[in-house]
Image: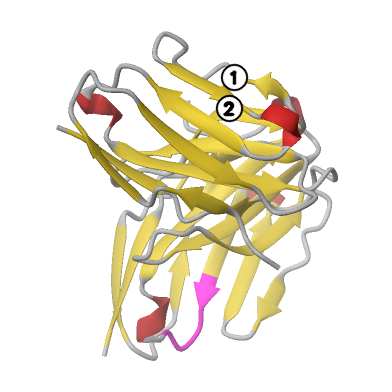
Amino acid sequence: EAGVVQSPRYKIIEKKQPVAFWCNPISGHNTLYWYLQNLGQGPELLIRYENEEAVDDSQLPKDRFSAERLKGVDSTLKIQPAELGDSAVYLCASSSRDTNTEAFFGQGTRLTVV
Amino acid sequence: AQKVTQAQTEISVVEKEDVTLDCVYETRDTTYYLFWYKQPPSGELVFLIRRNSFDEQNEISGRYSWNFQKSTSSFNFTITASQVVDSAVYFCALSEVNSGYALNFGKGTSLLVTP
């Protein structure tokens, strides 16, 4: 069974440019998470989806970040415009309807803003 | 406020030594879950274990063991006879009913096992 797939693995952009990350969760997993991981820190939740609905986006900086999960499967996280401080690893994770199960993570997208 | 505290930032041991990674958590929920994840240099977070708040039984899986003590709000992780392949960053995490079971991670402990 395929795991959580993220692309791209690496992205380098200039500040003020837009960038988008894509995530394909494990088949059948209705819950999808986007996490931000700064260097030397633990992942921090940005947004959580139950199917296509964003049920917790309280930590998402909505002035420049946006996310969507059309049809309740794949998801895209966008930053526009990117700032130097956005350089980090963006992790996607998914879990099944039973929210007591563990979340499975993708390999992440390492973003560098120059 | 940090809900999960991993006081050890970095640990270095020699192969075959035992090592314990500490984790202290804070919650007001009676129903919650505790996790350990491993993050090797490749970057992917690998699930190791999940424990619910009603099950304080310790668990052993090969060289790994976990000690859950609600009285001290701790969920410590021990690696017996460490190996070089155990070198990674280890994260303890808490999920609570009130946050929809989203994972709240500690800052991680970087473990280096040398030959």
Task: Residue at 26% x, 90% y: name it.
Answer: B115
Does the magenta run of residues contain A65? no
**Furthest residue in direction top, as rendered:** A63
Residue A7 seen from this side: yes
Q: Would you call the spot at circle 2 few (<14 residues within 10 Å), some (14-19), or many (20 or more)?
A: many
Residue identified by numbered label 2? A47
Of A58 and A68, which appears nearest the observer? A68
| Vertical placement of residue B59 versus A84, above or below | below
Residue B28 seen from this side: no
Residue A98, picture quadrant: top right
Q: Position of residue A112 (x, y in %)?
A: 23, 39
| Vertical placement of residue B40 versus A60, above or below | below
**Horizontal relation, residue A48 to residue B107: left or right:** right
Task: Residue at 50% x, 49% y: name it.
Answer: A6
Q: Which residues are magenta?
A: B78-82
Residue type pointed to by label 2: Ile
Q: Position of residue B4 (x, y in %)?
A: 52, 41
Residue identified by numbered label 1? A57
Dominant secondary structure of the residues highlighted in magenta in the image:
loop
Of A41 and B73, which appears nearest the observer? A41
**Horizontal relation, residue B67 to residue A44: left or right:** right
Residue type pointed to by label 1: Asp
Disc 2 chain ID: A
Residue B109, picture quadrant: bottom left
Q: CA distance from mark 1 to mark 2?
A: 4 Å
Q: Are marks 1 and 2 in contact (CB under 8 Å)?
A: yes
Which tag, 1 or 2, sits closer to the chain's start? 2
Q: Position of residue A12 (x, y in %)?
A: 23, 40
Local SS, label 1: loop
Disc 1 chain ID: A
**Horizontal relation, residue B100 to residue A48: left or right:** right
